[in-house]
Image (cartoon, grey):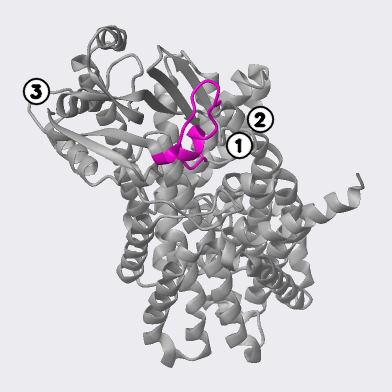
Amino acid sequence: MSSQPMKAGTAALSLAALGVVYGDIGTSPLYALKEVFGNAHHPVPITPDNVLGILSLIFWSLIVVVSIKYVAFVMRADNKGEGGIMALMALVLRGAEGKRYAPWLMLLGLFGTALFYGDGVITPAISVLSAVEGLEIATPLLKPYVIPATILVLAVLFACQYKGTAKVGALFGPVMILWFSTLGLLGIINIVQQPHVLTALNPLYAVSFMAANTTLGFLALGAVFLALTGAETLYADMGHFGRKPVQLAWFGLVLPALTLNYFGQGALILHDPATIKNPFYLLAPEWALYPMVALATAATVIASQAVISGVYSITQQAIQLGYCPRMEVRHTSGDAQGQVYMPGINWLLFLAVVGLVLGFGSSTSIAAAYGIAVSMTMIITTILAFIVVRSLWRWHWLASALVLGVFLVVDLAFFSANIVKIHDGGWFPLTFGFGILLLMTTWKRGRSLLHSRLLADAMPLEDFVRNISGSSVQTIPGTAVFMTQNLSAVPHALTHSLKHYKALHEKIVLLTVAAVDEPVVPDGRRLEVARIDDRFYTITVRYGFMDQPDLPHALSLCDASVLAFDMMDTSFFLGRETLIPRLGSEMALWREKLFVAMFRNAGSAAAYFCCRRIAWWSWVCRW
């Protein structure tokens, strides 16, 4: 095979990655440098040494955190091609299986996942708001319309989500090429006016700045970190494009464009310190201001789209792994498996984003909330990566500690600098993240307790089959599929069905759905069928955390010589419990009530498993 098609495919994927992967970090120049020197709480004085020091900090932070840690190192820790903190958590649990600290690692990974939801709220708010704020630079008369215009853009963005990224994805790459090219061009135009800013490429300027401004330099790291937000997206979206296209897009266009733009903003500030009110938009000539606002708005919409899609994806994974109640999931593409739309999540996210915009009122205020969640997620990623390199890659402990230790020191420095933002808004992503973590752990624990109680009341399957084989129970034609969590016990739905109908189907299948710690399970390993006797069978259906369950399709894969399915003659049965909280159980009463509320509002199992013909049997479980 010629390498030419492969090169063309890599180039196309790199183009697509520009919009989906780099939208978040690519819009950071809108606000990052402004927050360093224009922050109302602890602004860095605008002097040549300080400007060069900050530019050097930003550049080498991009090199160490993004280029080395994520692009060159963390992206190697893929779970069969998929990335992201849930994929990493699955790898870690595989390597730490049986270890006493495994539950704590799982909790750590869940907290990192919960923090991603906070990022999913903040990113659309700060990105779109910072872009629309360019209208204020055009004329102060438009200032009262900034918030309404931002909400309007966000409303259109969330209203269009049902169409899926496949419909607008073709525009993402070209728009982002124009965006990054414009970033680089504007930077070059201003660097030419102050070429000595390029000396900030020397890391000694960053070291000198931190040495001369110990306290102020430490506080400035919280704003410098804004240039790195979006780095986690590189890893999370790796599965959509592959490692090489993501790396090619970073080193080939994104990193050079970001560097030129930041250095151009630095040159502009040195030339005229008054431009710190919005150095990004003032890079452009006056005639280009309105086109820049339009382009920036488009870029921030793309960045927001990527994060919103990521929230859908991670919610679907959480449902698969049992940390979230079932919700309606709509596939928006017949070709791309990961493109989904979740109406409930979409509008809850929209309300949270609008509430954030109205509550904080400006990108500067939201910037105080931005960073602490991402920096904590980066620390969690580093800790989990250490377990992977030790347990799965078999690195020597010294090499593991040296490499991961450097990353951890950098992560802790940024996190420590962001802690001071808690009072000014950093409390929001932490509170939001802890809330999501509470919901996920409550659901997981509640389902486990419910399963244990149902199992305690269930009859062993072997005894039931033996008793039925010698009885005169009437047989009706067709196949009955009883969905259960335990194949060794009789599902309550089966006993209630027998009691009600006084009959059993010709074929009875006990089916359980198992989630595995890999992204996608191939059809060849989807089913495991076991025959008990001429009437009873058990089936285990395996799904990865990126799979969309479709039981009729899975059963169609059954070997006809073992068990043939006619979907028009097959009915699905699933028990539906009515839970009643009670005192003295294994969970606190308030948490029991929370679980019961989540349980009652969970989505339809029939819709989630794509089962159209399903019968429900209800009973009360005194929780």
Magenta-drawn stretch, dominant element (helix, strand or loop): loop
- Secondary element at image label 3: loop
The answer, for residue 213, to whether it is visible in the render is yes
Spatial separation of the CA atoms under disc 1 and disc 3 = 46 Å
The x and y percentages for residue 135 are 49, 85
The x and y percentages for residue 521 are 57, 32
Q: Earlier in the sequence, mark 3 or mark 2?
A: 2
Q: Residue at x 31, y 8 (%)?
A: 462
* Residue 407 disc label: 1
Rendered view: 101 above or below 427: above
Q: Would residue 553 be counted in the magenta stretch?
A: yes
Rendered view: 440 above or below 153: above
Q: Residue at x 31, y 40 (%)?
A: 614
* Residue 584 disc label: 3
Q: Residues within 10 Å of mark 3 (few under 14, many from 20)?
A: few
Q: Residues within 10 Å of mark 1 (few under 14, many from 20)?
A: many
The x and y percentages for residue 272 are 62, 80
Q: Which residues are magenta?
A: 543-568
Spatial separation of the CA atoms under disc 1 and disc 2 = 7 Å
Q: Are marks 3 and 2 in contact (CB under 8 Å)?
A: no
Q: Are marks 1 and 2 in contact (CB under 8 Å)?
A: yes
Amino acid type of the residue tagged 2 in the rendering: Val
Q: Is residue 501 left or right of residue 478?
A: left
* Residue 403 disc label: 2
Q: Is residue 203 left or right of residue 529?
A: right
